[in-house]
Image (tube, grey):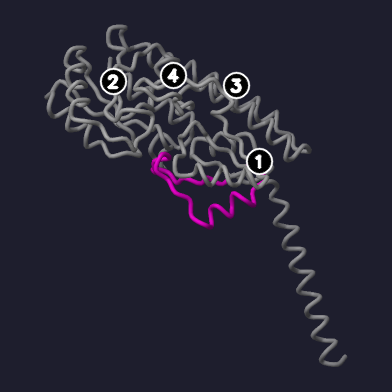
Amino acid sequence: MNLRMQSLLLVSLMLVAASCSNAADGEDGILVVATTTVLGDVATNIVGDAGVVEVLIPIGVDPHDFQASARQVAQMDEADLVVANGLGLEEGLGDVLAGLEADGQIVLSVGELLEPLSGTEGAARDPHIWMDPMQVATVVGFIVGALEQVAPEGQWRPNADRYRTELEAADAEIRAILATVPEQRRALVSNHDSLGYFAARYGFTVIGVVVPGGSTLAEPSSAHLADLVSVIEQVGVPAVFAESTEPASLAEAIAAEIGDDIEVVELFIGSLGGPGSGAETYIEMMRTDAALVAGALS
């Protein structure tokens, strides 16, 4: 065999090997990209072993303030399905998601398919839908419908049915945890307007927020903060709830002004927690948050 024939054979073998490698990669199934850690966990419970779920926004990062890298945009473009929250939550991804959708990518903005609550501080639509597990149970159905569109051969419904059962059980457990909070202490103050769905589901009232509006990017005025201090003192709220993804400096300043009768309690809201946090999955996160709220207000 001459040198030219040997070279052609080597190239052919390399192409076959690459083809086999690509086929092996395809055995991983579909690729779903979820914007937030919460949606990533929900999607993972539905997809199971039939594919890979990649999460765009890392643990501990505020979804309101996240910007995607060029590599991440390319990954979304290559995915079989992109799952987003919508309702303005991913403020830094709005143009990217709209561009992907315009180019034909399937972008499932789950919040847009619900009937969202209005914000307590003037926001037209509250994006924090996942703070009610039964809203998430509805979102599961939306994700299943999208998966059946992009991969109709998949058996998505058994996993979805199992996960919905887990969500219903978690909802009952959260309600039981919060039952220790007396009626007169079911008033919530949060670092930003993120607890509306939680309050509506479990019988609380949001009486004020440190950062007005549904975003963490707004700037509270001194008059707003003074009014909030007055409300807290009048109602006798014992805690301000901050979020693990945001600085709590303003909440801490308010607590310091009021004195020893109030504490700042950090919840997991915009992101799941890391290993050992007690908030490594969505259901764990909600249980942990319920226990923190009950402990602070009981």
Which residue is under mark 1? 106
Q: Give left or right: position of 292 versus 48.
A: left
User: Which of the two residues, 239 or 181, is positioned nearer the viewer here?
Assistant: 239
Relative to residue 54, is residue 262 depicted above or below? above
Give the spatial CA distance, label 1 vs label 3. 27 Å
Quadrant housing residue 294: top left
Judged by depth in the image, the label closer to the viewer, 4 or 1, is 1
* Alpha carbon distance from label 3 to label 2: 34 Å
Q: Earlier in the sequence, mark 3 or mark 4?
A: 3
Question: At 45% across and 46% down in the image, what residue appears?
Answer: 58
Q: Of discs 4 and 2, which sits in the foreground?
A: 2
Indicate the position of residue 253 as horizontal and vertical percent values: 17, 32
Of callouts 4 and 2, which one flags the residue occurring earlier in the amino acid sequence?
4
Element under disc 4: helix
Which residue is disc 4 drawn over? 174
| Residue 137 image point, x, y percent | 57, 23
What's under tag 4, amino acid-wise? Ile
Q: Are marks 1 and 3 in contact (CB under 8 Å)?
A: no
Callout in the foreground (1, 3): 1
Q: Alpha-carbon distance for marks 4 and 2?
A: 23 Å
Q: Is residue 62 above or below residue 166?
A: below
Q: Which residue is mark 2?
A: 208
Looking at the image, residue 66 lies above or below residue 111: below
- What's the distance in space between the residues labelled 3 and 4, CA to CA? 14 Å
- Whether label 3 touches label 4, CB < 8 Å: no
Amino acid type of disc 3?
Thr
Residue drawn 42% across the image and 34% down it? 279
- Magenta highlight range: 54-81
